[in-house]
Image (cartoon, rainbow, N blue to C red):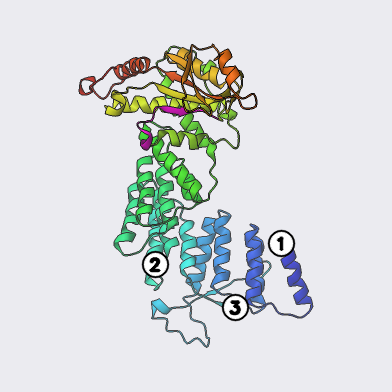
Amino acid sequence: MWKNALEVKDDMVTSGVIPDTVTWSSLISACANAGLVEQAIKLFDEMLEAGGQPNSRCFNILLHACVEACQYDRAFRLFKSWKERGSEQTTSNDNLNSSDDSLAVHHTRVTSRPYSHLTMGVPFRPTTSTYNILMKACGADYYRAKALMDEMKTLGLSPNQISWSILIDVCGGSGNVAGAIQILRSLHETGIQPDVIAYTTAIKICVKHKKPKLAFMLFAEMEKYQIKPNLVTYKTILTARSRYGSLQEVQQSLAVYQQMRKAGYKPNDYYLKQLIEEWCEGVLQNEHHNEGQFASRITDFGPQSMLLEKVAEHLQDSNAESLSIDLQGLTKVEARIIVLAVLRKIKEKYIAGDTTWNSMEDDVSIILGLQELGSDVIKGESDGVKEAVIRLLEHDLGLQVFAAGSRSGKGKGSRMYSSSIGETIERSESTQASESPTRRPMVLQRLKVTRESLHHWLQKKMESSPSPSPSSITITTQ
């Protein structure tokens, strides 16, 4: 695009058309956006030679081009040169009062370069954007950035939201997380409402310095002040933790994930799924089994996997009294993660002394799907889910499991069909005769984890847990 822009400029000059300030600004911007700093400065010189009067946008474009090209020293040299040479008053029709700092107009004298042969005065009026660009060039030098903001104020310029966000970023980049948060707090105290950029910058700093609790506190604060998170905010907060330690931390991240989806953003599930999987697999710690053989594979999740939604659904506190796990439509790997997630939730609640889980009276029911009587196919169950779950519960965790089927049909009465694992549910001859040949009754196939074995497993986990003290928990065995 910049080549086309230069060709248009050459055609204009050939045709005798003199480019105006807007045209020169567009040409300089085209080269600057392409990273061609030298070409942008050359065009700036050509503009001066042609008698053009650059505006503040032209100056800012050059500074921004230097900063984007990581030529920070060059940006400061240009800025200093423009300011210093502007101290020399030039004869113009502006009739400026040089003693009024707040209204002073700086002038610069552009010396000759190999491609520049004229020397002329050019008005230079730094703006808030000018100082914002230079503050970005400060890197982690907070005091230099703060000095630029103070200088901005002495010229009668007001720092905007971008200015404060940059100052927060520079302060955090210097390692002063507390100072960055204090700047954010000071905005509220001075009556300035921080925007989403300021909060997202502060959250990024917390994440970078491994302070997830502070990051989530700031995220909650955004909701308090009705500041809507953007895509960058969501992506940043979801990477705040490199691993999960408690159920609350998992619920917190899943709540953000669901909020992100409701807001219309498409999250990258891969990172969060890895952390959830690792947290769920933590249930198997201290169990005697070959972890490598049965460990799940994150690469097995399909692009349309609803695993995180399922995990969030089963870990909600509103489901505290529910002992049912729905695995319909899930793959073996996904089913494994869901089961482990629920078991870890029960374990943490139990160890914390939650009375709901300490006095369980029912078995844990695991729904596999519907099955027609006389058929070996369970609708809604992926290949091998039943066997994989049974192996996980019995072999890996030492729990007692039995299969159960609940018949559903036209009849009012439905009864349970129970069998040991590996057996099939058979219909009697009388049932076959009474049912319609075109519509066979369906059986809801389930697995059940006995409450006795679950209590035994939980007590073992509590005994191996360093806290809380076992004496502070009342255990009720049914």
Q: Distance between the residues labelled 1 and 2?
A: 37 Å
Q: Quadrant of residue 62?
A: bottom right
* Placement of 381 over or under 33, stated as above or below: above
Q: How far apart are marks 3 and 2 (CA)?
A: 25 Å
Comparing labels 1 and 3, the label whose residue is closer to the camera: 1
Query: Which residue position holds label 3?
Result: 53
Dot 1, crowdedness within 10 Å: few (<14), some or many (≥20)? few
Q: Quadrant of residue 96?
A: bottom left
Q: Which amino acid does label 2 sit on?
A: Glu
Secondary structure beneath label 2: helix
* Placement of 327 over or under 79, stated as above or below: above
Residue drawn at point x = 58 percent, y = 31 percent? 301
Whether tag 1 and tag 3 are in contact, CB under 8 A, the answer is: no
Q: Which amino acid does label 1 sit on?
A: Met
- Who is closer to the viewer here, 62 or 277? 277
Query: Which residue position holds label 1?
Result: 1
* Placement of 388 over or under 215, stated as above or below: above
Report the span colored magenta: 317-328
Mark 3 or mark 2, earlier in chain: 3
